[in-house]
Amino acid sequence: MINISLPDGSVRSFDKPVSGAEIAAAIGPGLAKAALALRVDGKMKDLATVVDHDAKIGIVTSRDPEALELLRHDAAHVLAQAVQELFPGTQITFGPATEDGFYYDFVRAEPFSPEDFAKIEQRMAEIVDRDLPIVREVWDRTKIKDYFAKHGESFKFEWVDELPKGEEISVYRQGDWLDMCLGPHLPSTGKLGKAFKLTKVSGAYWRGDASKAQLQRVYGTIFFSDKDLKEYLRRIEEAEKRDHRRLGREMGLFHQQEEAAGMVFWHPKGWTFWRTLEGYIRRKLDAGGYQEVKTPQLVDRKLWEESGHWEKFRQNMYLSENEEGLREFIAEPEKRIFALKPMNCPCHVQIFNQGLRSYRELPLRMAEFGSCHRFEPSGALHGILRVRNFTQDDAHIFCSEEQIESETIRFCKLLGEIYRDLGFPDYFVKFSDRPPVRAGSDAVWDQAEGALRSASAAAGLELQLNPGEGAFYGPKLEFVLRDAIGRDWQCGTLQVDFVLPERLDASYVAEDGSRRRPVMLHRAIFGSFERMIGILIEHYAGRFPLWLAP
């Protein structure tokens, strides 16, 4: 017998392996009709998946939070099928679900036009009406490469060779069209419904590399109801009216230009706004026991190597030498290479390391409005929300393990006060744990994650898990505020770091006279001044409260 444990605590027994669809039908005809996918021991699977062992099962319907991502992933496949039916010779690459919709990247000689969007949407609706079964198949490498070669899919053909040897390759077929995909997917195209809309097209590069083929990225969104779609489109229209790039120019706050891409020219009114915001947060930091410092912008690569940032961030750092200079450095190791700092933390450790530190000085709260530089691809830049030169409202708290909890509570209180003052009383917190590529041992990460969880509980925080998204040196809390039209913006962070003090040999004299490593808490409230100002412009639609108005 196969025992299936359901979310309500009941158990259903079957005398043979059973599919998700059969389980739903056994529970009731209403659930069988509403079923979209299967959750097996917490993992999402196709509804057709056969369960051959005792398991905890959940039937996913449109009411489940993860169902929307499933719907959007399938919409990307239906978009790709519609495009290839309408425009033969178009190649497909990848098409995932996104936070607010989906996209698919295409290779096509002619650019997509607004008229094309209407045709594509109509064809997508036709594919939904066909109610094509979406069927998972497992193919070997030879078969799938032969298929992509025969159909002129050179990008998919190339990607097959990138997959790990021995990995199972699955394709999903809907009618005569198929795509290589891990899944899961809906049972049929008819389950999509027609509450979808194509929204825009932009440029992209194959595998994110500007030296490779240029792609056309078609974006869209989809919901389970027309009501939700209309509400989303209304918010998009409102967001366009509030666009900080347009309002920033019209209000004389700032401008940007190609000669300094990713940088900001602050005009008198904009700089007045900046200084008002800076003065406000400086007063908050002074009252909170922070000491303000200033560190160099150009720092020898040796420090970045010691901290681990050279390996992690070098491709995004502005260097005093080009690639030719780096090759010369390999031949001449004594050659010095400098980098504009992409973050402040290693420099703050240098200040901490000057002189002998005592446990009596802890916690030491070190703040800096530090100007940082990071190279971002041009396609990733977005007004002043995503720039190459930005000023962080950065601070690092050097403390003992015993002080992590009290400092977390103290920081969360400060952050809440500032967000409320700025007009953002509504925010939530994500807990980001260890990423796949990281510094430090598992034992150190266990310690850091445990400390941050415990401190978060003591601070009364309700956490949403954000798996694998921690910094390379430690887990972090991400504070996400919600603006006037319901959009979420990740701004504040708090990170627990046991790694960097070890790498940079930071220590203090403990009460018993021994030398100990401090714990380093990385924290920010705005994220950057540029980003926060952009958010404030859009939140208030340019109609700032009197104390902020320039």
Image: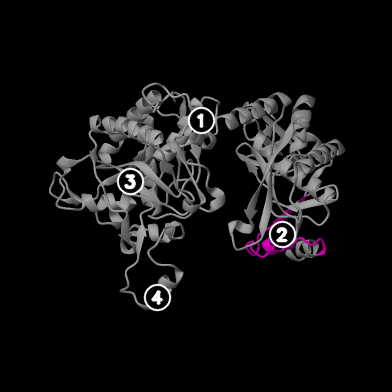
Closer to the camera in the image, 167 or 155? 155
Q: Quadrant of residue 58?
A: top right
Instruction: Give me the residue at 48% from left, 53% from top.
Output: 259
- Any mark on residue 156, and which? 2
Dot 3 corresponds to which residue? Answer: 370
- Dot 3 surroundings within 10 Å: few (below 14), some, or many (20 or more)? many
| Pointer 2 with pointer 4, Cβ within 8 A | no
Residue 400 sits in which quadrant?
A: top left
- The residue sitting at 79% across, 38% down in the picture is 118
Position of residue 286 in the picture relative to residue 494 (left or right): left
**Which is more N-terminal, label 3 or label 2?**
2
Residue type, mark 4 in image = Glu
Q: Is residue 202 above or below residue 363?
A: below
Residue placed furthest toward the left: 513
Q: Residues within 10 Å of mark 1 (few under 14, many from 20)?
A: many
- The numbered dot on residue 538 is 1
Which is more N-terminal, label 1 or label 2?
A: 2
How far apart are labels 1 and 4 at the CA level?
47 Å
- Dot in front, 2 or 3: 3
Q: Is residue 350 left or right of residue 387?
A: left
Q: Earlier in the sequence, mark 1 or mark 3?
A: 3
* Residue 546 spot, x, y in % from top left: 39, 21
Residue type at numbered disc 3 = Gly
Mark 2 → mark 4, Cα distance in angstroms? 38 Å
Dot 2 falls on a residue whose secondary structure is: helix
Q: CA distance from mark 2 to mark 3?
A: 44 Å
The foreground one among 267 and 388 is: 267
Q: Position of residue 235 (x, y in %)?
A: 61, 28
- Local secondary structure at mark 3: strand
